[in-house]
Image (cartoon, grey):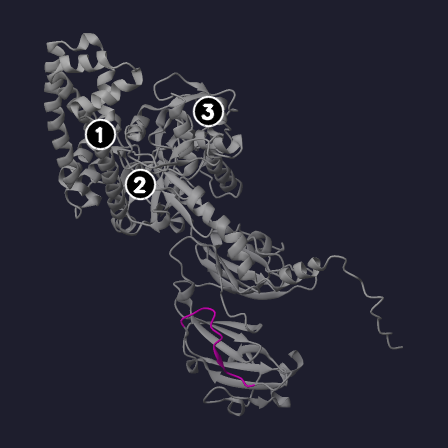
């Protein structure tokens, strides 16, 4: 039955008409407007006020903490409880105590994340090289500012930087700290904002001071000869690549290879690793070594343990008899995070705008900013001296006729009239008259008068000198250079991270370490894989498969060969046959989805032995298209085990063929039709995910079902199905050529 039309009386009533308007407004609001109104302010706040450091080398959280400690008198005073510092910092930093304490830990000497820590800590502050060594609570630890903080605050009270209100307008805080050295290049820093990140590695303080001084003298100087490379508090060795280093210096982006340091203790037949890369932890290394030992890939090691104590980090590796320690370490460097790459992304806020800058550009910005700080400091001192000279000029007028001044004061009836009468009697302003009126009676002697006169002359000379300094950029550069030399003399330390060159280190070649012998490999339809030696095959050559499973591919090769497994998710997994244990024909073998860590529901569709990556791969899709991709497109210089985008996903894959030389192939459709063509008709494509070209034209509801070499078919009348150009429809299969008809 048709529904009865709802009457106006039965419709729901809205008591408040504004509700409907509100609903309409919500429904009509564009998503872009919502993002702009609600999300963009948050994103900008994270970028500008939280995650990205500024030219002084600090994020707001660092700056607020250090300034609070400075105001607490912790630069020269004794240590105080960390909980006290955290509580005081909340006046500037409206976050929880845990976040503030975490910031303090990272800046501390005990944690060891910085080459020059700003917090002199006492107690357990954890270690940067340990994932599990947690720091003690703030009520158990104590801290003060390190001596190097004098270089951060030396100009703070001389108007070198701007001050702004804190979040509740109850006190002032500095916008930047006027560091007298390029802390942005000395202190390592990292942060993740919204849509961007920052990763700054630290450099040696002495080298940075030299580079900044040289840049001030000559902006075109060779920085790579002064800044040898990053310096990390955990030590280690940089594997120096001049091209990569110059790229970082020029663009602010790139990576630096670093590895740990070790020594061989012959008497105990063990290796002691005493420095590790800045990017890893002791636990990560131990876990990876344990994994390699369990997988049987590290048979040279009998045990590895952490022997870190108060003397510093130490990992002990017990060796089996006859093991070469240098070769073993080369293997560990390749297989674990004992050798790692540190990414560089020098993203810094300049004038409130994030900019990715190279080292030269960073030095340029720092020198310009520091020049402005020094100039402001000079103007501050100049203003103070001019004020003092102004007072002394008024005093000089009074002292020239002191008797008149005394008479004016004595004859003045009201105390409030003393200053106005002195102003009228000597032609001085109120500030000068106030200063004169406060002079003690004992100071009107001849000696005092002569001293003030000489002081006036000296002040004039100082003011002239300061005015010349403020107007002379060359002199300001000399001041900055002198301060840099002073900082280097007082605080510079020898490099902790050594520099080695690639030709000086021993590399590990897995192929050379793996014994080479002939093997046969077998892949089943359901993804079981076996590697069998000829001896095992001679003893029993009947392969075992699960019920419903059967053979898919088999090859004869060697144990050092590389193998690629293409999957149903357009991915390819690369590994070496040495990663698989020798098997027997009587077992099922390794289940590849589990062995290779494939995604859920992913299965192996084809196996390829690439060899020297010559030849090509032909991909045939159910829509009749075929793509020819050079095998070299799958070669990788890095140790990547998984490649995405192995082939096109526009149509289901019907077949794959590894082609070493052009030949004739037979294509069979479900109609059934057959087509024989030469692979020379297919031009190679440059991208792996290409859809290729149409080879076989198909009628609706039919698909390409199978591809075989001509030799593998039972076709007797080859000319009937052969074509000279593609695409082609092929010919209907005849009964005498119809073996494939029963298979389709």
The 10 Å Cα crowd at callout 2, few under 14, some 14 to 19, many 20 or more, is many
Q: Position of residue 157 (x, y in %)?
A: 30, 28
Q: Position of residue 451 (x, y in %)?
A: 12, 15
Q: Position of residue 501 (x, y in %)?
A: 26, 43
Boundaries of the magenta span: 686-697
What's the residue at 39%, 29% (across, down)? 67
Residue under label 1, please give it: 381
Question: As displayed, is residue 177 above or below residue 221?
Answer: above
Q: Quadrant of the N terminus?
A: bottom right
Which of pointers 1 and 2 indicates the residue nearer the eye?
1
Q: Are marks 1 and 2 in contact (CB under 8 Å)?
A: no
- What separation in Å lies between label 3 and label 1 (alpha carbons)? 32 Å
Q: Quadrant of residue 663?
A: bottom left
Q: Are marks 3 and 2 in contact (CB under 8 Å)?
A: no
Nearer to the camera, 23 or 454: 454
What's the residue at 49%, 40% (across, down)? 288
Q: Quadrant of residue 331?
A: top left
Residue under label 3, please give it: 85
Residue farthest to the right?
1
Which of pointers 3 and 1 indicates the residue nearer the eye?
1
Q: Which mark is residue 238?
A: 2
- What separation in Å lies between label 3 and label 2 (alpha carbons)? 37 Å
Residue 385 sits inside the magenta stretch: no
Q: Are marks 3 and 1 in contact (CB under 8 Å)?
A: no
Residue 687 sits inside the magenta stretch: yes
Q: Is residue 552 left or right of residue 237?
A: right
Indicate the secondary structure of the residue bearing disc 2.
strand
């Amino acid at each position: 039955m048709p529904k009865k039309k709802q009457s106006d009386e039965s419709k729901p009533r809205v008591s408040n008409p504004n509700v409907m308007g509100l609903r309409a407004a919500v429904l009509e609001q564009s998503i872009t407007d919502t993002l702009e109104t609600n999300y963009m302010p948050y994103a900008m706040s994270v970028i500008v006020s939280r995650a990205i450091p500024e030219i002084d080398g600090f994020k707001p959280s660092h700056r607020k903490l250090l300034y609070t400690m400075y105001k607490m008198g912790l630069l020269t005073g004794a240590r105080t409880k960390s909980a006290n510092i955290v509580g005081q910092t909340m006046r500037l930093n409206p976050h929880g105590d845990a976040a503030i304490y975490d910031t303090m830990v990272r800046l501390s000497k005990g944690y060891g994340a910085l080459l020059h820590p700003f917090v002199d800590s006492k107690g357990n502050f954890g270690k940067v090289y340990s994932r599990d060594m947690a720091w003690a609570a703030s009520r158990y630890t104590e801290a003060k500012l390190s001596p190097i903080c004098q270089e951060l605050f030396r100009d703070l009270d001389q108007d070198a930087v701007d001050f702004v209100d804190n979040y509740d307008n109850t006190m002032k805080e500095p916008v930047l700290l006027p560091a007298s050295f390029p802390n942005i290049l000395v202190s390592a820093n990292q942060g993740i904002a919204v849509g961007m990140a920052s990763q700054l590695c630290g450099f040696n303080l002495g080298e940075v001071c030299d580079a900044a001084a040289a840049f001030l003298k000559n902006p075109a100087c060779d920085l790579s000869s002064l800044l040898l490379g990053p310096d990390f508090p955990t030590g280690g060795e940089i594997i120096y690549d001049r091209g990569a280093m110059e790229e970082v210096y020029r663009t602010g982006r790139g990576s630096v290879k670093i590895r740990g340091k070790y020594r061989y203790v012959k008497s105990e037949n063990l290796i002691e690793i005493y420095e590790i890369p800045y990017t890893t932890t002791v636990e990560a290394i131990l876990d990876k070594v344990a994994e390699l030992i369990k997988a049987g890939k590290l048979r040279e090691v009998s045990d590895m343990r952490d022997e870190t104590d108060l003397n510093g980090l130490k990992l002990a590796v017990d060796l089996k008899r006859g093991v070469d320690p240098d070769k073993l370490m080369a293997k560990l460097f390749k297989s674990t995070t004992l050798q790692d790459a540190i990414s560089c992304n020098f993203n810094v806020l300049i004038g409130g705008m994030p900019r990715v800058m190279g080292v030269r550009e960073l030095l340029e910005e720092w020198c310009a900013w520091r020049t402005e700080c020094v100039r402001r400091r000079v103007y501050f001192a100049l203003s103070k001296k001019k004020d003092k000279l102004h007072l002394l000029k008024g005093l000089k007028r009074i002292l020239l006729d002191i008797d008149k001044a005394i008479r004016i004061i004595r004859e003045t009836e009201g105390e409030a009239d003393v200053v106005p009468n002195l102003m009228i009697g000597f032609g001085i302003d109120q500030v000068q008259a106030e200063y004169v009126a406060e002079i003690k009676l004992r100071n009107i002697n001849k000696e005092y008068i002569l001293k003030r006169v000489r002081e006036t002359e000296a002040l004039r000379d100082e003011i002239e000198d300061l005015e010349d300094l403020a107007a002379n950029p060359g002199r300001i550069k000399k001041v900055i250079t002198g301060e840099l030399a002073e900082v280097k003399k007082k605080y510079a330390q020898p490099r902790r991270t050594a520099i080695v060159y690639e030709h000086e280190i021993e590399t590990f070649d897995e192929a050379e370490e793996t014994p080479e012998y002939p093997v046969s490999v077998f892949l089943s339809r359901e993804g079981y894989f076996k590697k069998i030696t000829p001896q095992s095959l001679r003893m029993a050559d009947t392969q075992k498969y699960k019920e419903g499973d059967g053979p898919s591919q088999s090859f004869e090769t060697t144990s050092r060969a590389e193998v690629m497994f293409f999957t149903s998710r357009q991915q390819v997994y690369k590994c070496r046959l040495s990663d698989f244990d020798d098997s027997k024909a009587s077992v099922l073998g390794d289940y590849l989805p589990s062995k290779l860590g494939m995604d859920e529901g992913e299965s192996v569709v084809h196996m390829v032995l690439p060899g020297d990556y010559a030849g090509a791969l032909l991909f045939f899709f159910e829509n009749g298209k075929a793509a020819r991709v050079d095998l070299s497109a799958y070669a990788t210089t890095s140790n990547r085990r998984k490649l995405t985008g192995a082939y096109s996903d526009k149509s289901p894959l019907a077949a794959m063929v590894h082609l070493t030389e052009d030949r004739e192939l037979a294509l069979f459709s479900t109609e059934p039709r057959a087509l024989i063509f030469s692979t020379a008709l297919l031009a190679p494509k440059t991208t792996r995910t290409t859809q290729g070209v149409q080879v076989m034209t198909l009628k609706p509801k039919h698909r390409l079902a199978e591809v075989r070499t001509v030799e593998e078919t039972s076709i007797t009348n080859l000319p009937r199905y052969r074509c000279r150009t593609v695409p082609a429809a092929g010919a209907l299969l005849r009964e005498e050529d119809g073996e494939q008809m029963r298979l389709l």
